[in-house]
Amino acid sequence: MCRSIKTLRPPFSEDVTDEDVRAAALQYVRKISGFRAPAAHNAEAFDRAVEEIARSTAALLDSLEVRGRRAG
């Protein structure tokens, strides 16, 4: 949990996969919640947050413009 979330847009990262986006979302949720792995009664909320953040991250990356070109 202590490693930094890497930048996922060009020119810092050219080949961003769904797995990269999900890993960043998971790291974010872990950091915010304070849980590396949630208890069973929190697992659904934890997983839902990861998926929602991954979708939002992908949408953000798809809509960014970098130096006059679309990043995604």
Image (spheres, grey):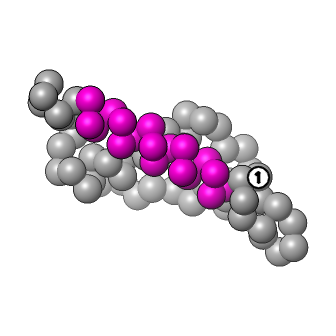
Q: Is residue 54 above or below residue 38?
A: below
In the displayed image of the protein, which residue is found farthest to the bottom?
Answer: 67
Picture coordinates of residue 54, whole percent (x, y): 50, 44
Q: Is residue 34 left or right of residue 30?
A: left
Residue at 33% across, 33% down:
47
| Region in magenta | 44-61
Task: Out of 50 and 4, give the one closest to the viewer.
Answer: 50
Instruction: Kindly identify which residue carries mark 1.
Output: 72
Whether residue 7 is in magenta: the answer is no
Picture coordinates of residue 15, whole percent (x, y): 72, 44
Whether residue 54 is in magenta: the answer is yes
Task: Out of 6 and 33, give the one closest to the viewer.
Answer: 33
Q: Give, as a three-letter code, the residue at label 1.
A: Gly
Q: Secondary structure at mark 1?
A: loop
Q: Main secondary structure of the magenta part?
A: helix
Residue at 66% across, 44% down:
16
Residue at 17% across, 51% down:
34
Q: Is residue 63 above or below residue 19?
A: below
* Crowdedness near tag 1: few (<14), some (14–19) or many (≥20) residues, C-alpha within 10 Å: some
Task: Tell me the quarter of the picture where residue 35 sits.
Answer: top left
Q: Is residue 31 left or right of residue 70?
A: left
Q: Is residue 68 left or right of residue 43?
A: right
Q: Is residue 12 left or right of residue 66?
A: left
Picture coordinates of residue 21, whole percent (x, y): 54, 43
Picture coordinates of residue 67, whole percent (x, y): 83, 74
